[in-house]
């Protein structure tokens, strides 16, 4: 039996002015670079079924519409110690269509 697709192909990150995004077969990840010393209370994030937004210290970093709907309750933000802020969306059925970064994000 061959290895799963993710193991064969690896993750291909797509760079953006604010960080990068990538996906697996089950999740979409958004990584946003935040200034050193950023605390969790400095971050305002909005995860909705068709929209995502992130502000740091009152400055809008990203805001946009997702290509397709997802379950907002399954999305999480995490502030990492070294690499910034992370967003993860889980939606196995529609993962490959969730992000459309040719739009406003």
Image (cartoon, rainbow, N blue to C red):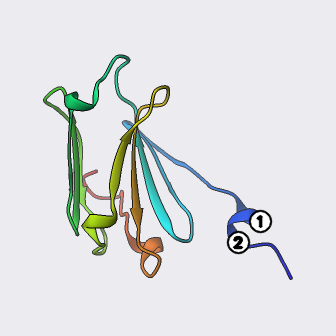
Q: Which residue is tagged 1?
A: 8
Q: Quadrant of residue 9?
A: bottom right
Mark 1, Cα crowd under 10 Å, few <14 / some 14-19 / many 20+, is few
Viewer-proximal residue, 83 or 22? 83
19 with respect to 7 (left or right): left
Residue at 29% x, 72% y: name it.
71
Q: Residue 73's spot in the image, x, y percent?
A: 27, 65
Q: Quadrant of residue 90?
A: bottom left
Residue at 41% x, 73% y: name it.
91
Q: Please tell me how many numbered marks the rendered image carries.
A: 2
Viewer-proximal residue, 3 or 74? 74
Q: Residue 60's spot in the image, x, y percent?
A: 18, 36
Viewer-proximal residue, 75 or 98? 75
Between the residue at mark 1 and the residue at mark 2, the CA separation in whole angstroms equals 5 Å
Q: Residue 36's spot in the image, x, y percent?
A: 38, 17
Q: Which mark is residue 5?
A: 2
Q: Residue 104's spot in the image, x, y percent?
A: 24, 53
Asked which secondary structure carries label 2, the reply is helix
Q: Quadrant of residue 101?
A: bottom left
Decide: marks 1, 2 in contact (CB < 8 A)?
A: yes
Residue at 22% x, 68% y: name it.
50
């Amino acid at each position: 039996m061959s290895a799963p697709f993710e193991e064969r192909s690896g993750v291909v990150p797509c760079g953006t002015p604010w960080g990068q995004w990538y996906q697996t077969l089950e999740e979409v990840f958004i990584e946003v670079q935040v200034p050193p010393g950023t605390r969790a209370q400095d971050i305002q994030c909005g995860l909705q079924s068709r929209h995502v937004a992130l502000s740091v210290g009152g400055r809008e970093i990203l805001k946009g519409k997702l290509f397709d709907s997802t379950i907002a309750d399954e999305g999480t933000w995490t502030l990492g110690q070294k690499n910034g802020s992370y967003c993860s969306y889980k939606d196995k059925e529609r993962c490959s269509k969730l992000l459309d970064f040719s739009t406003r994000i």
